[in-house]
Amino acid sequence: MPSLPDMTTPQVAELARQQAQAHPAHPTVPQPDEGQEALFETLLRIGDSALVLGHRVSEWCGHSPALEEDIALANVALDLIGQTQLWLGLAGEVEGQGRTADDLAYLRDAWDFRNLLICERPNGDFGHTLMRQFLFDAWHHEMLKGLAASSDPRLAEIAAKAGKEVAYHLERSSDLVVRLGDGTGESHRRMQQALDALWPYAGEMFLGDDKDAQMAARGIAPDPASLRAGWDATLRHVLTEATLQIPEGDFSHKGGRQGIHTEQLGYILAEMQFLQRAYPGASW
Amino acid sequence: MAAATHPSVEEVWGWLSEVPDPEIPVISLTDLGIIRGVEWQGDTLVVRVTPTYSGCPATSIINLDIETALRSHGIDKLRLERQLTPPWTTDWITQAGREKLRAYGIAPPIDGTAADGVLAGRIARMSGANLTIACPRCGSTHTEKISQFGSTPCKANYRCKDCLEPFDYFKCL
């Protein structure tokens, strides 16, 4: 009997892809033009994080605790999905195989997604959603500052545009983390619980691999580790004001940026991609 | 078509200044500052448009409205180009546009107050410089922010503490 693949290694993504491609109905997965792999990956990493988090946040639409919060969350989701169109649109161009942003969003399977794991975490309660947003925004803000200085003007212009929007996201999530952290006993407890639960997903934002090293060496994208100091400073400032304790552990889940995801991503894709899968090419 | 029979670029700008923004119809696309260039390339008219926010759902409607307006003026060879650089800023909203916003009930943006990621710092800078968002109805500067985001991504929600009316503030970007 063949042994099960080791689910903890990056090979699992490759195994899943091979299995799927062996299936006769599965379309061929295009590969990027030679020399463009690392850039394509980098664009997917930033674009997929924006897409998956944007989709997650949009789940609040119609369910938030107050109308203003509902509108605000929907607007944050809208910004993120707008940015996704720019990042994945460029990814498609770089790949050179004729795929559009929509093709990349709707017609890839989980192992081809490159988002950070924190983006696919379930929403939990409102406080949990805001804490996830704050941890992400603080990173996103630093990341876009780095990308705005990219040696590739195509990345720099998207980052400059997105960075202006994300500055508002960060101001908003910081403000609410402080209000709820330094709020009632119950809101404080929930915010601390959210921070503790999400902490093991934060470290992945700063873990680089060989593709990141290639991009950093060419000045195209910042080395993920270089974003840590700015992120730490924002966290210290905001979480101190919020009377929340920064957890001590440094264990980090990882793999999202290499295509190894939690089961949660599958549920997101099932909902997000259903229409295009069931009715290929449908538009309105 | 001979070049001499082209409508002039100035004429085209004039037509575009009559196309209303689909979400805030009191101001035009040129008031909003999103038309970044108009030029003839041979017998094709090229109009460069920049999006306000990346995800602004009005973008495709704006493009459609531009196309409809220009076709109604007899332009049949037309190309719209998206221009991202430099990114759109509320500084480009014309003075006339700002007055139209105020008259419509939307407080116009206060230049130089865009977010930089640190809310407390921005609030301190604004109060240090005595910058307040005035109620577009009664003019009072006793106003408070209700939410960072209003009915569209480009606006925040405020309330006047004197006349008690809620209003939109076109936030600085």
Image (spheres, rainbow, N blue to C red):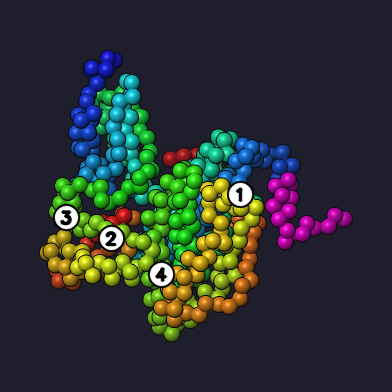
Give neighbour class at mark 4: few <14, some 14-19, many 20+ (Cα, 10 Å).
many
Mark 1 vs mark 4: in front: 1
Label 2–label 4 contact, CB within 8 A? no
Q: Is residue B56 visible?
A: no
Q: Earlier in the sequence, mark 3 or mark 2?
A: 3
x then y, percent, for residue A75 = 38, 57
Badge 4 amino acid: Ser
- Chain letter belonging to callout 2: B
Residue to which mark 4 is pinned: A174
Rounded to the nearest whole Å, what is the CA distance between mark 1 and mark 4?
Answer: 33 Å
Residue to which mark 2 is pinned: B113
Mark 2 vs mark 4: in front: 2
Let me know if residue A13 is in the magenta part: yes
Mark 1 vs mark 2: in front: 1
Give neighbour class at mark 1: few <14, some 14-19, many 20+ (Cα, 10 Å).
some
- Residue A214 numbered tag: 1
- Residue B102 numbered tag: 3
Label 4–label 3 contact, CB within 8 A? no
Residue range corresponding to the magenta coloring: A1-19
Q: Identify which residue is drawn at 33% across, 24% down.
A: B41
Instruction: Look at the picture and state if B100 lies above or below B69.
Output: below
Q: Residue furthest right?
A: A1
Are labels 1 and 3 assigned to the same chain? Answer: no
Rounded to the nearest whole Å, what is the CA distance between mark 2 and mark 4?
Answer: 18 Å
Q: Secondary structure at mark 4?
A: helix
Rounded to the nearest whole Å, what is the CA distance between mark 4 and mark 3?
Answer: 30 Å
Badge 3 amino acid: Arg
